[in-house]
Image (cartoon, grey):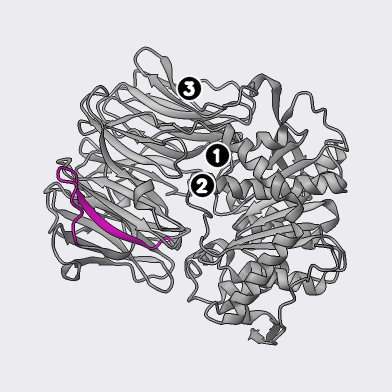
Amino acid sequence: MSEIEIRVPLAEKIEKKLEIHGDVRIDNYYWLNDKENPKVIDYLNDENSYYDAKTSHTKQFQEELFEEMKSRIKEDDESVPYKKNGYYYITRFEIGSQYPIYTRKKESLDTIEEVLFDVNKLAEGYNYFKLAGLSVSPNNKFVAFGIDTVSRRQYTLQFKNLETGEVFPEKIENTTGSASWSTDNKTVFYALKNPTSLRSEKIFRHILGTDPSLDIEVYHESEEAFSTYVYRTKSDQYLIIGSHSTVSTEYRILEADNPTGEFRIFQPRERDLEYNIAHYNGDFYVLTNKDDATNFKLMKTSEKETLKENWVDVIPHRSDVLLEDISIFKDFLVVEERSEGLNKIRIIRWDNSEDFYLPFEEETYSAGVYYNPEFDTNVIRYGYNSMTTPSSVIDFNVDTKTKEIKKEQEVLGGKFDKNNYISERYWATSKDGTKIAISLVHKKTSKLSKNTPLLLYGYGSYGHTIDAGFSSTRLSLLDRGWAFAIAHVRGSEYLGRNWYEDGKLLNKLNTFYDFIDCSKFLIEQGFTSKEHLYASGGSAGGLLMGAIINIHPELYNGIIASVPFVDVLTTMLDDSIPLTTGEYDEWGNPNEIESYNYMKLYSPYDNVKKQNYPNMLVTTGLHDSQVQYFEPAKWVAKLRELKTDKNILIMHTDMEAGHGGASGRFDALKEIARDYSFIIDLEVTQ
């Protein structure tokens, strides 16, 4: 098909006035919010047809990339077994299968395998299938599990008898997918979602084998800024109901052997008081920001006196170290910290005879404690990888100080040698003088120059930190002479909690300018140039993409914006949309004029203007519950109307998936191949 024959989709303009605070915004594409309108589906299909036409010449290359990426994956793979309550649990894949098989073996790895679920069989006939929340009863006879076949994270909770294979008849709709058992092996607690906002708002008690309509509501989280959940402590002695908002937490506790008892408040919620709790030996250990502990500290209190005035310091607050998490074992405490942007794992014996850190040697890397359900053990399991080192699962013996690599991610194909790649960390200077870290990887034979194609990735919201990790699919870029970098912008917790505070609410612009200044740094250092620099981000990272191209579109040759949160003002003014009210402490509440005016400064959709924009690929999912499909759809429509260049602008809507994309492991590779083919093709054709 020739360029002339490819019809550019043009969405109809229907004016809608949006007014608040005396300010009027005109939204000509508001009508795209209604997916029940056949014209909306027609428009999305038109965009998909346009995408297909504009990328038809890359279809063969996409398939080659997919096969290339797939060839590096060990298809008949399995997880490192972990032991819990007398059983070893293993997740494995078979050759050609899209989905995992969940199994277990009793007492020894040499015993006969018991298949809990073969997800490949369960997924037959579904375009999307997700099994989640597997929770085995204390007597090992039953398992609770959640199923989502739409990709809106609304799970149907079910139960299976592991001795007979029978699935119980009851189905509990619209849950988070997980459940927690009491010690009686028949009572479970689960969280129900609001059907409109999808906020998890109620905790119910269910008796196995009974009609769910008889379930007892034990807690209702009425504050819209909070969501609620339920879990059981590692000690197995308590059931915990948690309530969480961006700046506040609250817990309720109940002995696990008293399921019909009343949950009692651990410490009442207070704005700006955050805490997490773990139970051990008659005490609760509390990870908290109490007393202005910005980077958090560890405290403890008796299980009988849990109010904050009873908490005492165990690990005091440090201004230069972020305390991220703890894991409790019988003889020692494991602490996850972050300092100078890097993960640290610290081990402290309860008798104070030892206090030391695990050694990590690379300049930039990612490390974290794995799932460790066993309590009475001298071994901790952790994960390690870097931009050049594949992921490893490692067991560390606290007594002997020796480590055993239980598994290192295999990169098949015979071509990969980590010594052929180099990873470094650089520091750019942002417009306000702040130093911003950049983790960068490339092949040693690919000398960085102004002609080097470079993909810069960013996120920078919710305090979520993107660490410098390994990706076998990324090798398809690196082996073609590309460099890949991560901008550790404000809005994450890369350099501690203040790093997050400096990139949210009325400081959000820092996130965008940090990324822009990292881009300028890479160009000024001669690592790439405007003609060869590309940027990508998803969800809140898609917001980042939308903001940077409104501010400095000339810095980039191409942009990949995945499920992008770009219609900030309109979304945050609509409290019927999932996540909105719970997000006020992240973005601000635009019902207040100061927040409204600030958000209007950067909201990508509201700031599209007549100017040149880079080449762009935008992706979304029709059933996305976190960033609704209409945000990118409206954004693309407005960009088509106003942009003054002839660069490529294409949007692909997965009509079957949601926020996380495809559910099968190989289908997910096809999405990466799609994205990579877009930017590689731009390099080839320019």
Q: Position of residue 469 (x, y in %)?
A: 59, 35
Crowd around label 2: few <14 · some 14–19 · many ≥20 (10 Å) = some
Mark 1 is on which residue type? Answer: Ser
The secondary structure type at the circle numbered 3 is: loop
Q: Is residue 550 above or below residue 13?
A: above
On whether residue 483 falls in the magenta region, the answer is no
Residue at which label 3 appears: 358
Mark 3 is on which residue type? Answer: Leu
Q: Position of residue 548 (x, y in %)?
A: 75, 57
Q: Is residue 611 above or below residue 310?
A: below
Is residue 243 visible from the viewing direction of this image?
A: no
Residue furthest out toward the front: 1
The magenta stretch is 153-169
Mark before the other along the chain sequence, 3 or 1: 1
Residue at which label 1 appears: 319
Q: Position of residue 316 (x, y in %)?
A: 44, 37
Q: Are marks 3 and 1 in contact (CB under 8 Å)?
A: no
Q: Position of residue 527 (x, y in %)?
A: 83, 36
The secondary structure type at the circle numbered 2 is: loop
Is residue 89 visible from the viewing direction of this image?
A: yes
Left or right of 465? Residue 419 is right
Left or right of 299? Residue 454 is right
Per the rendering, the mark at residue 294 is 2
